[in-house]
Amino acid sequence: MDRTELQAKIDELMRHYHDEEIDGAPYAQAMMELTASAQE
């Protein structure tokens, strides 16, 4: 995953959280998974 793709996924995740489509715990879990996958 390149930086642009990662940023797009993070932006989408943040939008879901802002629109209250997901709660804090699932948001945090998804964010951790995204950042971990980018490090591999």
Image: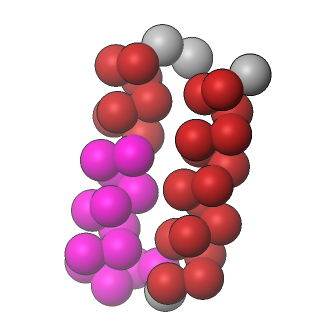
Q: Position of residue 12 (x, y in %)?
A: 34, 50
- How many marks do you count on the picture? 0
| Above or below: residue 16 compared with residue 30 | below
- Which part of the image, by quadrant, shows the C terminus? top right
Name which residue lies at 48% across and 13% down.
Answer: 2
Residue 35 or 20: which is nearer the viewer?
A: 35
Would residue 34 be found to the left or right of residue 17 on screen?
right
Name which residue lies at 69% across and 33% down.
Answer: 37
Q: Main structural element of the magenta stretch: helix, strand or loop? A: helix
Looking at the image, the residue that sits furthest to the top is 2
Looking at the image, the residue that sits furthest to the right is 40
Q: Within the image, what quadrant is residue 3 found in?
A: top left
Q: Within the image, what quadrant is residue 8 found in?
A: top left
Q: Within the image, what quadrant is residue 35 found in?
A: top right
Would residue 18 be found to the left or right of residue 37 on screen?
left
Would residue 28 be found to the left or right of residue 16 on screen?
right
- Which part of the image, by quadrant, shows the N terminus? top right
Q: Position of residue 30 (x, y in %)?
A: 60, 59
Q: Position of residue 19 (x, y in %)?
A: 25, 78
Residue 9 or 21: which is nearer the viewer?
A: 9
Q: How is the image coloured?
A: secondary structure
Queried whether the magenta region covers residue 26, the answer comes back as no
Magenta span:
10-22
Queried whether the magenta region covers residue 15, the answer comes back as yes
| Above or below: residue 30 compared with residue 23 | above
Q: Position of residue 31 (x, y in %)?
A: 54, 56
Name which residue lies at 42% across and 40% down.
Answer: 9
Name which residue lies at 39% across and 79% down.
Answer: 21
